[in-house]
Every structure is written in C-alpha cells, then in structure tokens.
Amino acid sequence: MGPTKTQSSTSQSVFYDDVKETSFDYPALTQGAVAHLEYTQLLKEAHLISPFSYGAGIPGWNVTFTAIVPENMEIKYIVKNDPKGLLKLTTEKKRGNTYYTWNMQQVKNEAGFGDAPDDRYYEPHVIVYISKYSNSAGQQTFVQSVDDLYRWNASFTKTLNQTEDPTLKGITDSLVKPLSSSLQKAEAIYKWVQNHIRYVAFENGLEGFRPRQAAEVCSKRYGDCKDMSSIITQMLRMAGIEAYYTWIGTRDIPYEYTDVPLPIVDNHMISVARIDGKWYFIDGTSPSSTIYLPPSSIQTKQALVGISDTKYEILTVPVAEPVISTVEDSTFIHFTADGIAGKEKVLYKGYYAEDVHNALLYRDEKRLKDYVKTRMGKASNKFMLGEYKVSKHEAPTLEASIVADFEVPGYGKKVGNEYYINLNLEKLFENQLIDTAKRKVPKQFEFKGQITEHHILEIPQGYQVSYHPENFEIETPFYQLSIRYTKQANRIIATQVLTTKVLMLQPNQFDAWNAPMAKIQAQYKEQIVLEKL
C-alpha cells in the first residue's frame, strides 16, 4: 500500500466540524491482484458506533466484519437488507472476549443513480451497539430501548434556556402583540427566525449534538439545526405556545426509532408545537417552508418529541398528498411565419412553490433569467424567452408564479393547406422507462405532486380542426397521466395532467411502472391537423 494522507473532511452542509478523513493508494494494481487493508478506529463516545456496510460502492470477494466484545459487556445487533440470509454470523470466545463475525461472499457493487435513496436503504449492513456493561457499581444499562436513547438526547437539553433573555423576549413580544391566534403567533415567530437567523453548521466534538442557548443564537444571528430548534422553541414558549425540542432523521436515513433506538436514526433537530390540538413540525433550517407544510425531506419520518427530561412522544410527519403541491400551466399559442409564439402563465403551489422560492433567494438578474428559461422552456431546444415576470407570496399557503412571452422557431409545420402540430409541448413523462437489467436499487421521489398543463392553440382564421387524437388516460398505483383535447370556438386545448402518487418505488415494482410506457410514448407522438376551409 502506498502512503496515506489524513486531512479535515469537508461537507457542503457543514461550515466546520472536527471530522477527519484518511485516503490511501494501492499503487500499480493489476487485474487479479490482492489488496489488504487493516485499520483501527477509536470511538470516544460509545453511542456513536457506525454500522458496517457490505458494499459501500466497492465489490468484494470475501468481506468480513468482526466485533470483539469484552466479557463485561453485552451487545445487540441488527442486520439490514439481507433478505436471502447471505450474511453468515459465527461467534467464538477467546481470552475473555467474544468474537462476533459476519461474513459475506461475493459482494456486488450496485450501480448508482441520481434519483436513488441513500445506499443504507438497499445495501446489506450490520448495526452493532452496546446494550449492557458491568463496572465496579454492578451491571449498567447502556442502550436497550428508545427510553435509553432519549435519556442521552435529553442530557444535551436539560440546561437549555433556563433563564429568559430580555432581548429575545422583547423581540417575541413585538412579533405576537398585534396577533390574536396562537397559530398566527407561531407563524410570525417562524418567519422572523427564517429571515433573521442564518443557517451555519459549526460542529466540534459533541457540539454536533448540543444545542446552543437561544439568547446566544439571537445575538450571533446564526446557528445550525439544533440552534434553530433552540431559539424557535424558546420564542414559542415565550409567546405562551406549547413547543418542544425534537430530534428527527431526514429521508436520507432509512431507520425508525422504534426499530433502531440509536443516534444513527436521526441527523436533524426541529421544533414541534401543539396548537389547538394539532401538531406542527417547524424546521428553522428551511428558508422557504411554511408552518403549514413541513419540508419534504422529513415527510414519513418519526420525530422524537422531548416533552420533559424523562417523557417523550414519537410522532410521524405526515405525507402531503398530490393536491397540496401543484403546477398549473396555461400556455397560449399562435402560429407565426416560422414557428409558434405565445405566453405562459404558470402557478406553483406547495413544494413546487418552495423550490421556486429557494431558487430565487440568491440570484442576480442574469442568473434569474437563466433559471426562468429553464423553468419555462418547452417544445424544442430552439425555445426563446421573451419578457417575463416572477411573483411569489406566502400567506396562507406558499405560492409562486411566472408569466413569460416566448417564441419557438421551427415548431409546427404548414404543408400546403394544412397545419400539423404536436400540442404536447412538454412531454411530462418522457424517458421514464426503467432499465431493469441495469437498475437494482429503488427510485425515490422528493414529494407527491400534480402538474396540469393547458396548451391552448389559437386556430388561424379560415382553418378548422380536421384531426385530433383520442383522449388518453393511464392510471397505476404509482402515477396517473391523462391527455384530453377540447375544442372551444377558435381554439383547441390539449390538457395534460400528471400525478405522482408515491415517494419510493422498489425494484419489484419496476415492471408495473414500465408496463404502460409504450402506450404513453406513442401518445406523445400524436399531432393535431388543421385544414383550410
């Protein structure tokens, strides 16, 4: 093995942490060569034992993981993603220790995909954790249940915000004084934190777990997710609202507290409030979320809500149905001498609107125009963006709209006394066939949603519609697609509606997903014909 190099690890989401990474080379490897690597990892906090993954992007012929457990200690283990039982466990006692060894032969390296979930969803791995140990005081429980995990988590919040900071109280009072309902007050507090506290993750040692005092976060005007949880919860309590520090994992993590009661189950903190009997999941790190719709990254996830030092509740973040996140696109088209031109009016709601709001946060005029062109482009790569206007608002639901003029030279054809045009200017479900020979890992969707497009063609004077395709509809458990044609006076309208109905598609569902694809692609080739009267 060649030389090793140890340096600070970097992450786009963390400004600073104390994580180190070591890289190494195997020089002059050739096919058939055997490489060997051994390393020792010292953990200063026994709660943070990492799972061992069989794969991790590297194929292996014979992969073994051994946990050496001293006689004064007991462990538990969880095996994930091994439905065929390929992982073989053997145990052996030697010199006062118990050796737990998991072996797997011929580990495959599954191809990666940009829309796949984290590899912990599908790669075989073993989770080992300490359940008990003995010392001079006798046998001690370490981690056996969610109760034990919560005691550890709550140790970081026991002394949090024990005194009321006058500056923060003054800010809170000024925000809520003119408001009558608790929900309005909570919304005002959330918006203030989003607008005044910048997300900066600074983690050193256990600072990655310990929230800072709300007064400090307010003074510095920045913080990470734990600090956002601290200041939001404290401000809500100052306003007389029931609120709690809450631990949660994003959808990058496949575990649940009731299944894996360990710190690896979460990577995030939020605030949870109960208002008029309803729970609200409030994430201060999401700059464009509203109190009414939790970020898509925590949908379906269990939240560990800290009611007191010893009491907690486990809640599940609900999934927003497709009607919550919608795109309504009305595109008005007319023929020109060399193609088509028109105006688009697009309204975004829910998570689609949140995407637009986030995209607009730090864009200058040049980058804004590029973004609008990407959003509004359709028909062909000759699309030319004209004048445009972007609008956004937040109350009571998050919305955004873009209105734009456009031209598309060369789109549509005039042959003799007839016009030919495909009114599917955007083929919303094109290139969605999954290659089941290559793909063996799940497909993940950011959220459920519905896109509706009305392509409205002005019929040239002296022409009539001589042909339009039949109405078309496909519905599966995963999506629904319909294309309908309507004639109105001097217009013909093609309305395409695509509804995404799932958040995760498993490999055993790929065939059912693929089944209608040939019909869909054939429908996308259909054209409208106009003939001269």
Image (cartoon, grey):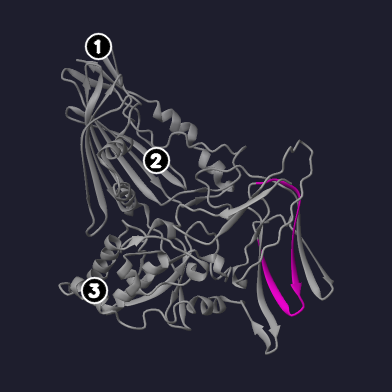
Circle 2 crowding by C-alpha within 10 Å: few under 14, some 14–19, many from 20 = many
Secondary structure of residue under mark 3: helix
| x and y percentages locating residue 350 in the rendered image | 31, 53
Would you say residue 336 is visible in this rendering? yes
Quote the CA–CA distance across marks 3 and 2: 47 Å
- Kind of residue indicated by mark 3: Thr
Compared with 100, 482 (above or below) is above
Quote the CA–CA distance across marks 3 and 1: 70 Å
The residue under the point 30% across, 74% down is 236
Secondary structure of residue under mark 2: strand
Left-right relation of 388 to 383:
left
The one of 136 and 312 positioned closer to us in this rendering: 136
Left-right relation of 272 to 170:
right
Circle 1 crowding by C-alpha within 10 Å: few under 14, some 14–19, many from 20 = few
What range is drawn magenta here? 58-79
Q: Which residue is label 2 attached to?
A: 481
